[in-house]
Amino acid sequence: MSALKKYLDKIKPSFQEGGKFHAFRSVFDGFETFMFVPNDTAKVRGAHIHDAIDSKRIMSFVVIALIPALLFGMYNVGYQHYLALGQTPEFIDSFIYGLLAVLPKVVVSYVVGLGIEFTVAQWKHEEIQEGFLVSGMLIPLIVPINCPLWIIAVATAFAVIFAKEVFGGTGMNVFNVALVTRAFLFFSYPSMMSGDKVWVNGNYAESILGINGTVDVVTAATPLGQAAAGEPITAPFMDTVTGLIPGSIGETSVIAILIGAVILLWSGVASWKTMLSVFVGGAVVALLFNAVGMENNAVANIPWYEHLTIGGFCFGAVFMATDPVTSARTECGKWVYGLLIGAMAIIIRVLNPGFPEGMMLAILLMNIFAPLIDYCVVQSNINKRAKRAAK
């Protein structure tokens, strides 16, 4: 690493103002600060915290936390494929198949998103922002395996431009970029995001792996899809925990997601208050629906603990609701924000059978109200202090 640092220091003048490659200064700066902690510190006097952990390091921790879900998602894609073919899934074969199927989605997401961010940075003569390091990994994990690459590219471009750059870039966006991508996909290409034919892949890697036949005609409903159709959930509860069920690439395994949650909490990147309150809000509302016992509504009668393990609930609670940019920032506000997300997700699931997965809409809705929640908390504290001072 020291040799790389010396080399970067040597060529750095060529990328600075007046150098022959100064037009690519943003690209060089982005690579240098990603690899090494920048030497720049705050020069203004005041309450500044000097720390080696900058935003790129924070984003790197989130990417690391997503790796378990990514790796298991790759395995599960292959597992579901071989299962649909009626074959006994072998671990290595399943993982290699899933790797070849998922990797292109990751590459497309990063190439399109980072390409736009690099272009905007060069155009505005600003440093390259690092926010898409996380969004670029989240996007492939929240889509079905059969979602075409060109659709992912279009949705990613839309989200980066209209949900991020128009608001000012990283740290200024109102909505979670990855969820805007999913929302764009769901409302623009619904047949690619829902139904029984999007969860089992049969179009990648056959020629590479020497597999004969595809599984295009095989359907595989998710547990939420079965419940929304009024059918009993056939997947055993432990399969919904381990993740050996059809679903979006990175959302099926509760165990892999919880490993990521431990990393986020240990590193201090995510708020345990937000994370816990989402689960509490979802569990309480699910218990209420269980107690009411709505007839002819299979989703309302799903046990509360299954609500937390199926669909994108767990993934959204750990990786989406805790987004430090779009979530509530006051300590009390984090509780309110998380509770409302969990509650709204279950309410949408139960009351809208045409959209059984409510986590996306719940988080996007609360992204809008997060500033209002913080404002109310701050104003409440101001009023309390004013009353104490008046006594």
Image (cartoon, helix red, strand yellow):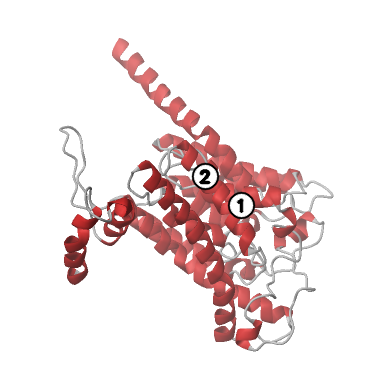
Residue 289 in percent (x, y) is at 71, 45
Residue at the right extreme, as displayed: 296
Q: Quadrant of the C terminus?
A: top left
Q: Residue at x 50, y 62 (%)?
A: 257
Place residue 265 in its image quadrant: bottom left
Residue 202 on image: x %, y %: 70, 75
Give the residue displayed 70% in from the left and 86% down from the top: 87
**Rendered view: 121 above or below 252:** above
Label 2 environment density (alpha carbons within 10 Å; few <14, some 14–19, many ≥20): some
Q: Which mark is residue 276?
A: none
The quarter of the picture where the N terminus appears is bottom left
Point out which mark residue 161 bears: 2
Q: Quadrant of residue 141?
A: bottom right
Labels in figure, total:
2
Name the residue tied to disc 1.
Answer: 182
Locate residue 380 relative to residue 106 in the image: left or right: left
Residue at 45% in and 38% down: 328
On the question of residue 176 being in view, the answer is no
**Amino acid type, label 2:** Ile
